[in-house]
Image (cartoon, grey):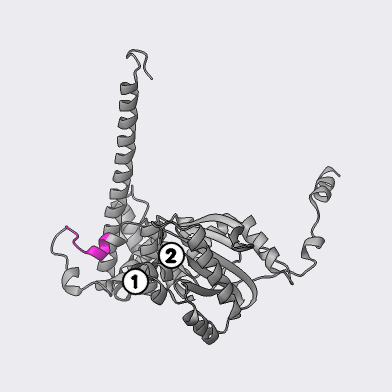
Amino acid sequence: MSQLIKIDEEYAEWIQSVGARFKSMQVKAATKVNQEMLRFYWYLGKDMVEMRAESRWGSKFYDSLSKDLVSAMPEQKSFSPRNLRYMTQFYQMYSKIVPQAVAKLNNDEVSLQLVDKLCSIPWGHHRYIIDKCKGETEKALFYVRKTIENNWSRAVLLNWLDTDLYERQGKAITNFDKQLPIAQGDLANELTKDPYNFDFLTMTEGYNEKELKDALTDNIVKFLLELGNGFAFVGREYRLEVGKTEQFVDLLFYNIRLHCYVVIEIKTEKFKPTDIGQVGTYVVAVNHILKTEQENPTIGLIICKEKDEVLAQYAVESAGEPIGISEYELSKVYPADFKSSLPTIAEIEQQLKD
C-alpha cells in the first residue's frame, strides 16, 4: 500500500473493492470473448454444412480451408483442420433441434436461445462432449446442462463422460414420486444413479461390507463426487439412540439441494426385502432425532451388489418411507493375495538405498 496516502480502514476497503471489480470485469470479458468465439464457430459450421463443403470440394477441403483461413487471419490459432471438423460436428449435433424458422440468420445478432446456452461453456468442453456423444443430441445436451448447472471443469466433465453419467442418472428404483412432494421427489430421483461406479476403489476378491465401507470413507472425496452435487458427509456408522437401543447408520449424508438427510446402506450381497425395513427404521429415526422443522423428510438409499428388478420394485412400493435401491459396480477386483504380493514401503526404500 502506498505510503503517500495515510492508511485507514475506509481507504483499504476501497482498494480491495476496486481490485474485486477489476477481476470481475476480467472474468466477464473472458466469458464474452468465449461466447462470441463459439457463436462464430457455430455459424462457420453452419456454412460448411449448408454448402455441403466436403462433398463439393473433396476430402482435402478442411486442409485447404485451414490454410486459407490461417493466411487471412495469421494471428488466430483455432483454424486447424481438426478444429474445423469439430465446428461442423458442433453445428450438426445441435442444429437438428433448432426450429428452422428461428435458425435463419438475417443479421449479425444471434437470437437463438440454444446457441446462447451452448456458448456459455468453453470450447474444450464441447470437444469432449462431441467425441463422447457421437451425434446423440439429447445426451450431449444433458452434459451441456450439467456443466452449466454445476460449473464443471474440463476434468470433472471428462470423469462423468467416462463413467456414463447420462445412462446412469435417475435410474435407481425408488418410491420418491409417492412418498415425497412432487418437486422434491423429482429432484431426489434426478440425484440417484444406477449403478454407482466404485472403480476408484482398490478391492480384493472376497471383500466384505466393512472393507468396502472402509474404502469408501478412505476415498470420501471421490465418493462424494460419484454421489453428485450437493452432498455433504455427516458420518460413518453414525450412532442413533432409539429407545433403549443403539442403531448405527452405515453412511449418513446431508444434501444441500434437497435440504434433507440421506441415509445410505451398503450391501455387498444381493438385495433382500428385509433391507427395506432396516433402512426405513433408520430414516424414521433420523427424522425424529436430527431433522428440524425447516428440513425436508429424510430419504434412504440402498446400494447393493445386485438386485432383482421386480423384487426391488415391489419392495419400494411396500415401503412407507422414501427409499431408493441401486447397484454398484467394480470393473476390476484384484486377487486376494494382491496386497501381500506388493513390496512394502520399507522394502522399496531399502532397494533404493542398495
Q: Camera-side residue: 275 or 269?
A: 275
The magenta-colored residue range is 109-116
Q: Is residue 61 above or below residue 350?
A: below
Residue visible at 34% across and 18% down in the picture? 8
Instruction: Give the number of callouts.
Output: 2
The reply to whether residue 174 is in sight is yes
Q: 132 left or right of 109?
A: right
Q: Is residue 182 above or below residue 349?
A: below
Q: Quadrant of the N terminus?
A: top left
Residue visible at 79% across and 59% down in the picture? 342
Q: Which residue lies under the disc numbered 1?
A: 182
How far is mark 2 from mark 1, CA to CA?
13 Å
| Amino acid of disc 1 | Ile
Q: In which quarter of the view is residue 276 placed?
A: bottom right
Q: In which quarter of the view is residue 153 placed?
A: bottom left
> Crowdedness of circle 1 by 10 Å Cα count: few (<14), some, many (20+)?
few
Q: Which residue lies under the disc numbered 2?
A: 297
Callouts 2 and 1 close, C-beta under 8 Å? no
Residue 275 falls within the magenta-colored stretch: no
Q: Earlier in the sequence, mark 2 or mark 1?
A: 1
Q: Secondary structure at mark 2?
A: loop
Q: Camera-side residue: 298 or 290?
A: 290
The reply to whether residue 60 is in sight is no
Residue 295 position, x and y percent, is: 41, 58
Q: In which quarter of the view is residue 15 placed?
A: top left
